[in-house]
Image (cartoon, rainbow, N blue to C red):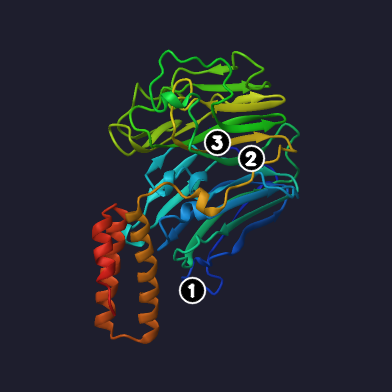
Amino acid sequence: MFYADPSLLAEGVSSYRRSSWDRSGRNADFFLLQPGQTVTLLEESGPGKICHFYWATAFASLFHYRQLVLRAYWDGETTPSIEAPIGDLFCIPHCTPVPIHSLAVVINPGSPDLLTLGANLYLPMPFASSARVTVDYDPIPDHPADPIYFWYHINLERHPRPPADNVGRFHAQWRRENLTQPVDPKFRNVQLFDGVNLDGKENYLALRAEGHGQMVGLHLQVDNVGGGWYGEGDDMVFVDGQPGQQWPPTYHGTGTEEIFGGGACPDKPYAGPDTGFHMVENTDFAGKHAMYRWYLADPIRFERSLVWTVEHGHANSFENDYSSVAFWYQQEPHAPFPALPDVKARIPRFPDVVWQADALRGRAKEEMDRLMKQGLPQQELQRVFAQGRAARAALAAGRLEEAISLYKSMKG
């Protein structure tokens, strides 16, 4: 979808990269992202285009995928066209990485004992006069906030002239509803096969865009607090109209799994070029789930507005945690984004044991840094480092009690 004929030579177009390479010529090809810090990853004058965006982190908190917020500004705009937690933007669901190999996003594994992965985004991002990309690190109150090792590559093109008027700017927006509200509380988390929804006004809202453009993707996450099959919810997409005013919607679906190309009630994960149910925590549908749909062959085009919604259970009967990133292109200006929630309101729902394990991880990292500065004998350092690697590997694998035990045993 994004690949030009590789034999064609573009007149006046040059390719280049911005990255975190070590300017001293040594091998520290990363920077330390400090709690509370905002870092500018890219500041370019145009015209040009971002073609590929890669990043990786190491040793960071389990929650950093929603602590780090990526924003991008095109052509001197003062409000971002991209604003999303960095993990969700790259289809990392619920702060829990899983491999994905799709046309637009690829997540590749790294070493578990480094708590690392490789995240790739291939959606093109053109600009006429400038591009600015920043990342913010929002610490969680009363939780360890250690510096994060951050690597990145951004591959770009310089163009001899600005994009044509019909070339939209790339946009991405994060939303969350925690928890969705059942229309009738008497039937909370009950399958209402006879329930009626003839306006879509109470659906989960993933995108409300204004202007001329086209939607090209959606990353949807559901934490199924209610239990049971939650997916009897149709997508209802209103093109150049609004819920409660336009009926039927331009797109009316038949269930949540159909949006993402699955058969009825998927109970195991899958990830393809255009569609995926890349997280299925439990075969009985309880817990965390995530899915993506790329509208690359069939973009949802709009002239004036687009409202993308989905029912949370048929007739909106389920009380669950929904979050999403919508991806689209449009001509500027774009409508104002809703305010991004503070960091605590962005973190997924996790049991106390997850918070305990991550807190111990942070304190263990502080202890290892202290021991290195203290000049501990090499043999003792190796023992502590080996325990740290084992603890991180257990943490990455979800063996939380084992990780807690290993972290508690790490004494200098």
Q: Residue 55's spot in the image, x, y percent?
A: 49, 54
Q: Which marked residue is nearer to the observer: mark 3 or mark 2? A: 2
Q: Which mark is residue 102?
A: none
**Disc 2 element:** strand
Which picture quadrant has residue 229? top left
Q: Amino acid at mark 3?
A: Phe
Q: Residue 199's spot in the image, x, y percent?
A: 59, 18
Residue at the (42%, 61%) spot, across then down: 60
Q: Give the residue furthest to the front.
A: 186
Query: Which residue is more in the foreground, 216 or 136?
Result: 136
Q: CA distance from mark 3 to mark 1?
A: 35 Å
Q: Which mark is residue 26?
A: 1
The residue that disc 2 covers is 170
Query: Which residue is more in the foreground, 175 or 300?
Result: 175
Q: Amino acid at mark 2?
A: Phe
Query: Are the residues flagged by discs 3 and 2 in contact, CB closer than 8 Å?
Result: no
Q: Residue 145's spot in the image, x, y percent?
A: 47, 65
Name above or below for residue 375 compared with residue 208.
Answer: below
* Residue neighbourhood size for the residue with mark 3, other residues' Cα within 10 Å, grouped as few (<14), some (14–19), many (≥20): few
Q: Which mark is residue 2?
A: 3
Which picture quadrant has residue 396? bottom left
Assign the C terminus to one quadrant of the image: bottom left
